[in-house]
Image: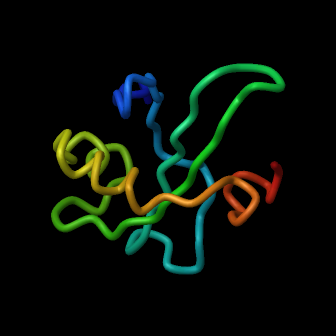
Amino acid sequence: MPARSLTVDGHEWSVYPSGYITQYTQDEYALMFTRGSGGDREVRVTRYSPQGTRSREQAFAELGDAQIRELFDQSQPSFTSPEAGYER
């Protein structure tokens, strides 16, 4: 699935669904927000419950830009998340 982009405070972030599956399977999905590369790469993660379609790809496509920005504001650093391997 292609990543979407989001600009926050002048920084460009790539947004895409995580491949990590929780115990809630299709009731909850994770989104990964990344910017930079290599050692300068920053990763943030958040989870959300789709309101319409339960397919991960379709639910991601149905998110509007404002919803993605709101999810970014709720996201946490990668070291707090199993989706990102708890890495800093």
How far across and how far down the image is residue 78, in percent?
Answer: 69, 53
How far across and how far down the image is residue 12, in percent?
Answer: 44, 22
How far across and how far down the image is residue 47, in percent?
Answer: 46, 65
What residue appears at the point 53 percent right and 45 percent down from the top-left corner?
Answer: 32
What residue appears at the point 31 percent right and 46 percent down from the top-left corner?
Answer: 60
What residue appears at the point 76 percent right and 58 percent down from the top-left corner?
Answer: 79
**Picture quadrant where residue 53 is located:** bottom left
What residue appears at the point 17 percent right and 46 percent down from the top-left corner?
Answer: 66
The color scheme shown is rainbow
Left or right: residue 30 versus residue 81 is left
**Picture quadrant where residue 74 is located:** bottom left
How many numbered marks, from 0 up? 0
How far across and how far down the image is residue 36, in percent?
Answer: 64, 22
Establish if 17 lies above or below 36: below
Left or right: residue 16 versus residue 66 is right
Left or right: residue 47 versus residue 63 is right
Establish if 50 lies above or below 2: below
Establish if 32 lies above or below 25: above
Image quarter of the N terminus? top left
**Which of these two is toward me, 76 or 82?**
76
Q: Can you name the residue that lies furthest to the front here?
A: 9
Left or right: residue 82 versus residue 6 is right
